[in-house]
Image (cartoon, rainbow, N blue to C red):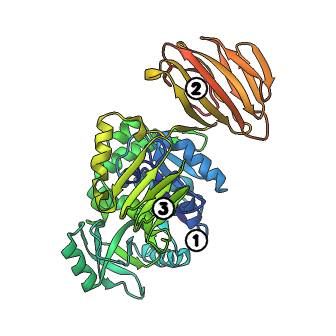
Amino acid sequence: MIVPVILSGGAGTRLWPLSRSALPKQFLALNSGRSLFEETLARFAGLNGHCSPVVVCNQQHRFLVAAQLQASGVDGASILLESEGRNTAPAVAAAALEALARAEGTEDPVLLVMPADHVIADLEGFHKAAQLAQKAAQRGHLVTFGIVPRRAETGYGYIRAGAQIDSLPGAYVVQRFVEKPDARTAQGYLDAGGYHWNSGMFLFRCSRYLQELRTHAPDMVTAVEAAHAQGRRERDFLWLEEQRFGASPSNSVDYAVMEHTADAAVVPMAVGWSDVGGWRALEELSEANSAGNVLHGDVHAVDVQRSYLRSEHRLVAAVGVDDLVVVETTDAVLVTRRDGLSGMPALVASLRQEGREELVHHRRHRRPWGSFEALAAGEDESGYKIKRICVDPGQSLSLQMHHQRQEHWVVVEGSAEVTVNEQVELLGPGQSAHIPQGARHRLHNPGQQVLVIIEVQCGPYLGEDDIVRFEDRYGRS
């Protein structure tokens, strides 16, 4: 049995302003009609003998994961929630323990570990590589997938393939792992052959991975075992016990296990892989026009060459420029030369130091019941705030109250069931309700279409933390 393990802890800061910490790149549709996470779910659909996946993600992304699993028709998934990221090795350890618990002692599952934010164009080739890796894993190997390099790349680590594993053509013993090289060294790897990009994808049996961890990182296994055993289960979620999980050393699978084990193997593959690590990588996944430009959304370009121009919200017009990356969203615009993208981490760090909200949220905030978007606000968000709230069919906001503000709701589309203290009424388009300060209230969508309301808040403090929940179907405190 193959258990797909999807690691969904990345922040995708190199794709700011599209990727935000509350909605990172794996949950965005960047190069197709599906998000990267949904594409990862579709990737294991053609594997023989696979079962429902184990997803490891940050607590704040749990509803995004659950919603996209549901939208993809994936049932029975285990969603493990990290209170803080401890890198990939503890996350995979928790997934291995969960897979063994689900097997209930009947077998030793094989884990196929995949980051949630990669692209693989050739699914048939990937499935063949996974089947070969499974044969190697049955012999006790811990397999990593190497990517046949397409250029002398300095942004990836490399894997040097050694001797072929007996009677397994295409699978090799790992001779060594090497760090990200400089340009000259990377070209040497390309010329020499036998070097492959390190994809960060793995396949091995649960017992072998945990055995190697107990040998090379025993403190990690102890911490993660306790976090898993003492975790709190709630529907499809397992909240890993925060103190225990936080006590685990932070390390990657490569550093914790693969570079130390005597049984590391590599299966090289050329499957159109990308880690979508930045705007240049996303540009490579898109088709350029005759001028070498990639244009996405409402873009008008005149006398522009070799540029990536992306509009998410409004018209972007460019004239007489070359070699630019321009990305527009509702609340932020990125402008940089293509050769300046290496400065993205410094830009993000500077914005984080200033406490900019644009690093965390888009103007449209997603919630398990739908979304809301701030349309206007008083200075320093005091006095008044206007929101557009969308509630999905059958969904409800929590029964709640606010200490500092009153609210007025106007239904724009759909039907709303509004509870204010003991009174419940059904409202349609053009009708409204007033929510006094301190009143218990709830908004529910009983209809079959999305409910849209305009909310006007008034009060001395309008922060999102002024909320007391009495009942909540999503388990929020």
**As displayed, is residue 187 above or below residue 101?**
below
The percent coordinates of residue 436 (x first, y second) are 64, 11
Q: Nearer the viewer, residue 439 or 343?
A: 343
Do labels 1 and 3 touch, CB within 8 Å?
Answer: no
The residue at 27%/60% (across/down) is: 255
Can residue 116 be seen at all in this image of the molecule? no
Can residue 434 be seen at all in this image of the molecule? yes
Q: What element does badge 2 sit on?
A: strand
The residue at 60%/72% (across/down) is: 48
* Quadrant position of residue 326: bottom left
Residue type pointed to by label 1: Leu
Residue type pointed to by label 3: Ala
The percent coordinates of residue 316 (x first, y second) are 49, 53
Q: Is residue 430 left or right of residue 96?
A: right
Do labels 2 and 1 touch, CB within 8 Å?
Answer: no
The quadrant of the picture occupied by the N terminus is bottom right
Classify 10 Å Cα crowding around label 1: few (below 14), some (14-19), many (20 and above).
some
Circle number at residue 47: 1
Circle number at residue 386: 2
Residue type pointed to by label 2: Ile
* Quadrant position of residue 406: top right
Looking at the image, is mark 2 or mark 1 nearer the viewer?
2
Q: What element does badge 3 sit on?
A: strand
Q: Nearer the viewer, residue 346 or 418?
A: 346
**As displayed, is residue 185 above or below residue 335?**
below
Mark 1 vs mark 3, CA separation in Å:
43 Å
Q: Earlier in the sequence, mark 3 or mark 2?
A: 3
The percent coordinates of residue 468 (x first, y second) are 55, 19
Circle number at residue 301: 3
